[in-house]
Amino acid sequence: GQQVMQIPQYQHVQEGEDFTTYCNSSTTLSNIQWYKQRPGGHPVFLIQLVKSGEVKKQKRLTFQFGEAKKNSSLHITATQTTDVGTYFCAGIKAAGNKLTFGGGTRVLVKP
Amino acid sequence: EAGVAQSPRYKIIEKRQSVAFWCNPISGHATLYWYQQILGQGPKLLIQFQNNGVVDDSQLPKDRFSAERLKGVDSTLKIQPAKLEDSAVYLCASSPQGAVGELFFGEGSRLTVL
């Protein structure tokens, strides 16, 4: 079945620094979504990418969809304490309708 | 706009007992999902409904789990009998159409099986 892997599993970041988390799928995706889950909370939608090579920005967050539509990345610049949480990517297999989540990247910010 | 409502928020039971969770999606959302999230892992899809029909239940342990969405609105997820490994947060989500768009999640129901 479809597998979605995320690396790293944990990310400790100094406040003000940048970091990137990566998402890789075993199959070609029709689209990919990113969610953020705060500690004790539920996943909240951040963005959806559909086109090959697509890049979208939300303030300090930059999302990219790979050319082959099998991988994606999330880059956060100037990390703040409000960025603490787990970031999940979730992909839909091409010609499918089931959203499969990765294992998440847990981000801790050191002030 | 009211969000996805779930109850109960917390439930503690002993193994072999039964439990039921309820979800009321955002009004007008045709698609409803139940995800299981074990501590430290990503959400795993258990079942997906489109209106009151099942779209995908390939990962639902059907010997102990059942779900229904009568009248295409709210839904219940039942576990009988529960096992220790069922301890998890059960997340309900809804979306206006298929899984192509944004999923709106409820707060979740945290189950502890002793």
Image (cartoon, rainbow, N blue to C red):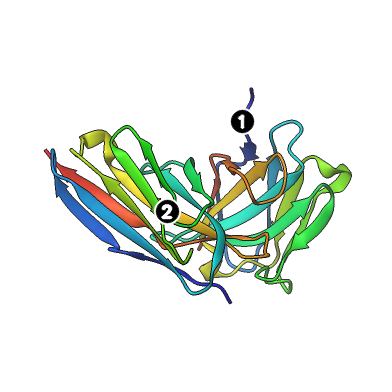
Q: Residue visible at 13% across and 44% down?
A: A17
Please report, as a chain letter, where disc 2 is located. A
Is label 2 in contact with label 1 (beta carbons under 8 Å)?
no
Left/right placement of residue A20 relative to residue A95 reads left
Q: What residue does disc 2 label?
A: A88
Residue B39 visible somewhere in the drawing: yes
Q: Residue visible at 38% across and 60% down?
A: B40
For the residue pair B62 and A108, the one nearer the viewer reads as: A108
Q: Position of residue A39 (x, y in %)?
A: 36, 44
Q: Amino acid at mark 2?
A: Phe
Residue A43 visible somewhere in the drawing: no
Q: Do discs 2 and 1 share a chain?
A: no
Q: 10 Å neighbourhood of mark 2: few (<14), some, or many (≥20)?
A: many
B25, above or below A94, in the image: above
Q: Position of residue A61 (x, y in %)?
A: 32, 40
Q: Position of residue A27 (x, y in %)?
A: 53, 73
Residue ranking furthest to the top: B1
Q: Amino acid at mark 1?
A: Gly
How many marks are shown on the rendered structure? Answer: 2
Q: 10 Å neighbourhood of mark 1: few (<14), some, or many (≥20)?
A: some
Q: In the image, which disc is placed on residue B53?
A: none
